[in-house]
Image (cartoon, grey):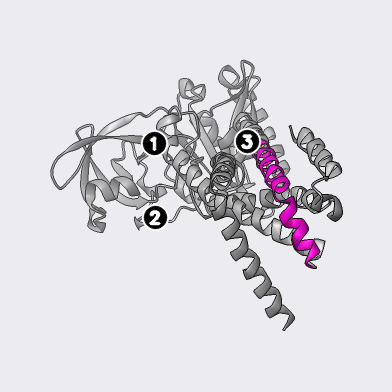
């Protein structure tokens, strides 16, 4: 019975709060739009921080993935030589596999099978085990296999968007020929668009085999990904690679003298310290924007409460306890916050929709894609409830703290003075 009574009181408070906000349309509109701005901007930046720092990467057992870099006398962190990577793969015992993706392949004309039309597609070239190391499950067909490698393999993996847009999601495209730069390539499979690494790609081809020549030993143009064996800590894998790097430096001094290996978790390798720091900094900045919005709304509530002192005094005179009145005023704040939060989620969605056109290409890694999803909605709603309490409690407490006799006599100077001091503090 007590629970039912509480629910009935809550519904009554909500209905009364809605009526009060409707009766003060100007106040409600200004306060809701102020909150919508703060919550909307925070939701958009949260989406960026979430993609960069928290959202699970689209790879199987990503916690075991690491990125490998070389350190040379002239560069503290650079790409990897394909021949050095080959030797790491052969000599190490800490990894299930080491793979690479080659940067700077550019786009090639993709000739679609149905109508012969041509479009440019972003392409990356990888080792045959790249998708196996990432544990990527294809949508259709298969990914590359080690036996696919040859002097000049003509195989291609399609991204989901290209597959849907140019081939109408036809699963029979697997095994058929398409043309890249006028050359025929056999489609082996289709992978999800979420399978992105540091740079965007719509199609993937095989790099092929590398001849053992000195110039390739010094050509550090590959991003390397590795999967640690279960139970192998990063420190042990790093120590093993240090030994192998020293061995290669003695065997190939012309290319590898003074060269070392850097190993880091895959998220840190893709995102980088600069983007991680920038994301947290921006989240802090927009957090202060939200606090400013809260302060403005709290001031509006204080002003509104000052105009309602006689109403509150009458409720007290009729027997309403102070806690009951505070709960009603807090309910109004929460209803207002939910309204602002809903509008703010819409603002955040609009910002994220416009973001691809506003963010310069290449500024964000391909794996970091801010998106409007359930996590952003939950963040917006949580922020709305939090700020509802933040800007609602103290104004409600201030509004109910005056002397009943003084308020009824319109002499509530102490209450007015207290409210003025709190507004000054907010400013």
| Residue ID at (83%, 45%) | 411
Question: Which numbered disc, 2 or 1, marks the residue that appears first in the sequence?
Answer: 1
| Residue ID at (58%, 40%) | 34
Q: Position of residue 357 (x, y in %)?
A: 40, 32
Residue range (magenta):
290-318
Secondary structure at badge 2 equals loop
Secondary structure at badge 3 equals helix
The secondary structure that most of the magenta stretch takes on is helix
Q: Would you name the residue on which mark 3 appears? A: 286
Toward the front, the furthest residue is 409
Task: Specify the label residue 138 is tagged with.
Answer: 2
Q: Would you name the residue on which mark 1 appears? A: 125
Question: Which numbered disc, 3 or 2, marks the residue that appears first in the sequence?
Answer: 2
Relative to 93, say whether 252 is above or below: above
Q: Was residue 162 drawn as part of the magenta stretch in this picture?
A: no
Q: Quadrant of the C terminus?
A: top right
């Amino acid at each position: 019975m007590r629970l039912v009574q509480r629910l009935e009181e809550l519904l009554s408070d909500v209905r009364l709060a809605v009526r009060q906000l409707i009766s003060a349309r100007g106040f409600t509109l200004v306060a809701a739009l102020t909150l919508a701005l703060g919550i909307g901007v925070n939701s958009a930046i949260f989406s960026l921080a979430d993609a960069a720092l928290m959202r699970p990467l689209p790879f199987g057992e990503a916690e075991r993935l690491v990125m490998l870099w070389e350190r040379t006398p002239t560069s503290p962190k650079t790409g990897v030589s394909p021949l050095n990577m080959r030797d790491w793969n052969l000599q190490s015992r800490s990894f299930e596999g080491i793979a690479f993706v080659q940067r700077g392949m550019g786009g090639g004309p993709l000739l679609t099978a149905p109508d012969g039309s041509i479009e440019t597609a972003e392409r990356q070239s990888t080792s045959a085990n790249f998708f196996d190391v990432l544990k990527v499950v294809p949508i259709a067909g298969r990914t590359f296999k080690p036996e696919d490698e040859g002097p000049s393999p003509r195989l291609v993996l399609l991204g989901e968007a290209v597959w849907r847009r140019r081939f109408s999601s036809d699963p029979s495209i697997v095994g058929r020929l398409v043309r890249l730069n006028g050359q025929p390539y056999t489609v082996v499979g289709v992978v999800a668009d979420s399978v992105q690494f540091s740079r965007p790609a719509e199609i993937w081809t095989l790099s092929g085999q590398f001849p053992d020549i000195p110039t390739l030993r010094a050509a550090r143009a590959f991003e390397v990904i590795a999967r640690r064996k279960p139970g192998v800590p990063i420190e042990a894998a790093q120590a093993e690679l240090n030994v192998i790097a020293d061995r290669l430096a003695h065997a190939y001094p012309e290319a590898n003298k003074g060269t070392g290996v850097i190993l880091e978790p895959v998220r840190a390798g893709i995102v980088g310290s600069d983007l991680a720091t920038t994301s947290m900094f921006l989240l802090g900045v927009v957090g202060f924007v939200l606090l400013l919005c809260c302060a403005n709304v709290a001031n509006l509530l204080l002003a509104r409460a000052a105009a309602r002192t006689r109403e509150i005094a009458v409720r007290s005179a009729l027997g309403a306890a102070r806690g009951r009145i505070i709960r009603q005023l807090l309910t109004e704040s929460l209803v207002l916050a939910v309204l602002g939060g809903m509008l703010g989620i819409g603002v955040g969605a609009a910002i994220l929709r416009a973001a691809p056109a506003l963010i310069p290409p290449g500024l964000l890694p391909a794996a970091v894609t801010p998106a409007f999803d359930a996590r952003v909605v939950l963040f917006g709603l949580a922020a709305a409830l939090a700020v509802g309490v933040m800007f609602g409690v103290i104004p409600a407490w201030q509004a109910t703290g005056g002397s009943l006799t003084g308020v009824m006599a319109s002499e509530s100077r102490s209450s007015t003075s207290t409210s003025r001091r709190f507004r000054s503090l907010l400013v």
